[in-house]
Amino acid sequence: MADQAKTLEETVSPKPTRQELLEQNARLRRRCQELQQDWKEREESNHWIFFSNETVKLLLDPVSGAISNFNQEALHFYGYRRDDFSRMKFWDLSLLTEDQLRKDLYRAKNGWCKGFSDKHQLYCGEIRDVEVKAAPVKYRGKMVVFAVIIDVSRQKRNEELLSSKIEEYRLMPDYVRSEMAQRWQSKELRLLLDNIQIQVWYMQDNETYGQVNRAHAEFLGHRAEEIEYQRLQDILPGDAARRRVAQNKQVQARKKELEFEEWFPNSGNEKRLLRLTKTPQFDDAGNVEFVVCSALDITEQKLAEETLQKNNRLLEISSEHDDLTGLANRRLFDKVFQREWQRATRAAQQLSLVMVDIDFFKLYNDTYGHMSGDQCLKKVAETLKQAVSRSADIVCRYGGEEFLAILPDTDYSGAARVAEKIRFDIAALKIPHEQAVNTDIVTVSVGAASMPSMLGLNSPPREVMLNAVDKALYRAKNMGKNRIACLELDAEGRVKNTYG
């Protein structure tokens, strides 16, 4: 039995000749060149994403803290010259410790956090409060952190000023607090409120305005005196008024500060996203006497966050798909293979791989030119997607003219049928190829490998199956091309059956 297995292994893996080794080396060199070209094209296609709009954007090395790249708005915001800024590290800008920033960047690189608060010092010495929105991306072959810097200094100052005044009110003597209405109408407080950029007002009860500041009145398109001491229903649209009353009731019931976010049209009928903060103020008996409200316009911040998410998704899609054919690339292949292997292991199912190589493709490029070669690759890729049609199956471009398909829950005979369908469908395209041997059209050689998904392999399952499917493809090409060859592996990764 051992002699029979040995003979079968020798049949499957004949000792390569010198010429075959040279051809294999040439294939590997072409594959490396294709990967380098893929990365170059991907970086060029993503260039517009990084440098678009006026948001401050940085690419940060999470290990060294180096600023790998930046857009023009970053230079404008921080005030540095390009040469100086390109030599800086992220912690040169921040008031946080280097250790804390290393932790934040590490968490962002691994997708464990989407951002953090920081204080950044500009070239002129001014300190700005910022929010750093961060996400991991691949840049020049390694993972870096894509950061959007949002200046929230004015927002912080206004919030601190308002909080200090509320605290000042709370610390007032009882006789002063009893005269709350007169105090709110004082010239000093009116001047303060009208110079706060965020909207501020208070509610006498759940439905009735007290005093409002200029920012809130102008946002609604009224004068302050037209709003003060009026019912919400008389100032705001019906749905908005009912929503605000419900919010006030929640604050009354829970007796704690609450935040709400809502889209609301301003005086120009432009919808803006507002973050409402409503803080209850209590009388001596502990009852809610009135509610202090503020509204911060966070539309730009929200748009910046959405832009970051959109850009990150575009970068993720781009980094996992081949630009020419639209198929998955090696990175996505590795991710899907790991997922499907684990699923097959849990369900005790078989998993198959199919590798496709276009015959005499270098001669095709030399004869018809690279533009025609690209069109040929696109036609083959589209045909492969149609031939491998189940929703769980995935086809990727593995190299220059090589493609790989993952077939979950597919045994040896099923993989052979898919391989033959692919070979037949490509030939049916009848793409002319006058330099091909024994034919005048484009053909493909197909290798397939199947095995039960079992734990306990001596080598990683990805390596075992890729090695097997590569041997099968080599076998098909060695038989004269325009052929298929299939290998069935046992649970330990040894060849059990062959076809072709």
Image (cartoon, rainbow, N blue to C red):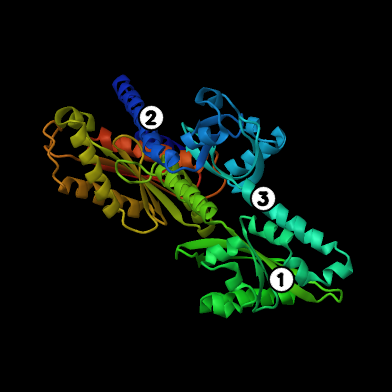
Check the picture and name the quadrant holding the N terminus: top left
Residue 161 in the image: state x and y as whole percent. Answer: 72, 53
Disc 1 from disc 3: Cα separation = 21 Å
* Image position of 125 (left or right of 288): left
User: Dot 2: what SS?
Assistant: helix
Identified at 70% across, 73% down, the residue is 251
Q: For label 1, count other residues whose C-alpha is less than 10 Å away and answer few (under 14), some (14-19) or many (20+).
A: many
Q: For label 2, count other residues whose C-alpha is less than 10 Å away and answer few (under 14), some (14-19) or many (20+).
A: few
- Compared with 22, 190 (above or below) is below
**In which quadrant of the rendered view does residue 213 lie?**
bottom right
The residue nearer to you, when weighing 211 against 433, is 211
Dot 3 corresponds to which residue? 156
**In which quadrant of the rendered view does residue 375 lie?**
top left
Comparing labels 2 and 1, the label whose residue is closer to the camera: 1
Identified at 68% across, 55% down, the residue is 159
User: Dot 1: what SS?
Assistant: strand
Dot 2 corresponds to which residue? 36
User: Which of the two discs, 2 and 1, labels the residue nearer the N terminus?
Assistant: 2
Disc 3 from disc 2: Cα separation = 46 Å
Identified at 15% across, 29% down, the residue is 367
User: Which of the two discs, 3 and 2, labels the residue nearer the N terminus?
Assistant: 2
Residue type at mark 3 is Lys
Residue type at mark 1 is Val
User: What label sits on residue 291 in the rendered view?
Assistant: 1
